[in-house]
Each structure stands twice: as structure tokens, then as C-alpha cells.
Image: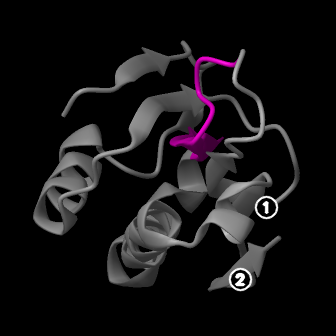
Amino acid sequence: MGYSFSKAKLPKGNSYPLKRSALDRALGQANVKDLVSVSYLRTQRPNEVMRADYHGDHRNDYFASGKTSVTIYSVHGEERAATESALLNEGVNAIVDWLVKAETAGSTWRAANHQLVLEFASQSLLQIES
């Protein structure tokens, strides 16, 4: 995989709900090409556990223009197993399918920024696309 990678150090009691190797395996199987970065960050918003962003190709001066990025957010340790299971069962596939869609979308779609956000709450995964 040819993307930049960063992983924030977490405070005690928090962990990441998805191993990089699981993500890389899914990305490789789908032959995702336009991924510019993967970041593992501390939780930013309640319930948000993973997201994919498409950076519209309307900005020629931006290094990620026309490319995608993925972010995985930390969870409390006691939520890790359930969150990981949801991501492995449906979340990673949803993200990867969305990344492939971004690579093959028409020029009108690719002209603007888009995102797919995965939230985990009440033992279920919610997909929010914009």
C-alpha cells in the first residue's frame, strides 16, 4: 500500500478497534489505488469510529485533491471487541466499497468533497454519507 500512515499514542484505557493489517488486507483485495493517507486518532466525536473522506479534485493546489483518506478513531477499552466485530463484519467492507466508488465516480461527483462516517452505538453500526 502506498499511503502515508500516522497513529496517535493513546491514554491508558483506550484502544483502536481495527488492526492496520485487517484494513490493508481489505484495501488490497479491492485494489484501492487513490488512498493518500490512513490515520489512527483519538476519539473526536461521540460514537464516530471510522471515516473515509474524498478530497474533491476542484483544488489543484491541494496534495490530496482527487484522493481519499481513512481515519480510525479510538474507543474505550471495554468497547473495543464489539466495535472491532462490527467493523470487521460490515464497516470495513462499507468503507472499501465507498473508496472504490470514489475512484470510479464521474467527474461531477469527483468535483466536490464527500465523506462516509461510521458511528457505533447501541451495539450497531450506522453509516452516514455526505
- Looking at the picture, does residue 124 appear above or below residue 91? below
Q: Residue at 55%, 46% (x, y): give it.
A: 77
- Of circles 1 and 2, which is in front? 2
Please state which of residues 90 and 96 is positioned toward the viewer in this rendering.
Answer: 96
Picture quadrant of residue 122: bottom right
Residue to which mark 2 is pinned: 126
Nearer to us in this view, 29 or 84: 29
**Comes first in the chain, label 1 or label 2:** 1
Residue at (59% x, 34% y) in the render: 14
Mark 2 is surrounded, within 10 Å at the Cα level, by few (under 14), some (14 to 19) or many (20 or more) other residues, namely some
- Our reading of the magenta stretch's main secondary structure is strand
Residue 114 horizontal/vertical position (percent): 75, 59
- When the figure is inspected, residue 52 is found, relative to residue 123, above or below; the finding is above
Contact between labelled residues 2 and 1, with CB atoms less than 8 Å apart? yes
Is residue 75 found inside the magenta-colored segment of the image?
yes
Q: Position of residue 37 (x, y in %)?
A: 46, 29
Residue under the image location 38 percent in, 43 percent down: 34
Residue shown at 37%/76% (left/top)?
Answer: 93
Which residue is disc 1 drawn over? 47
**Camera-side residue of 73 and 14:** 73
Secondary structure of the residue carrying tag 2 is: strand
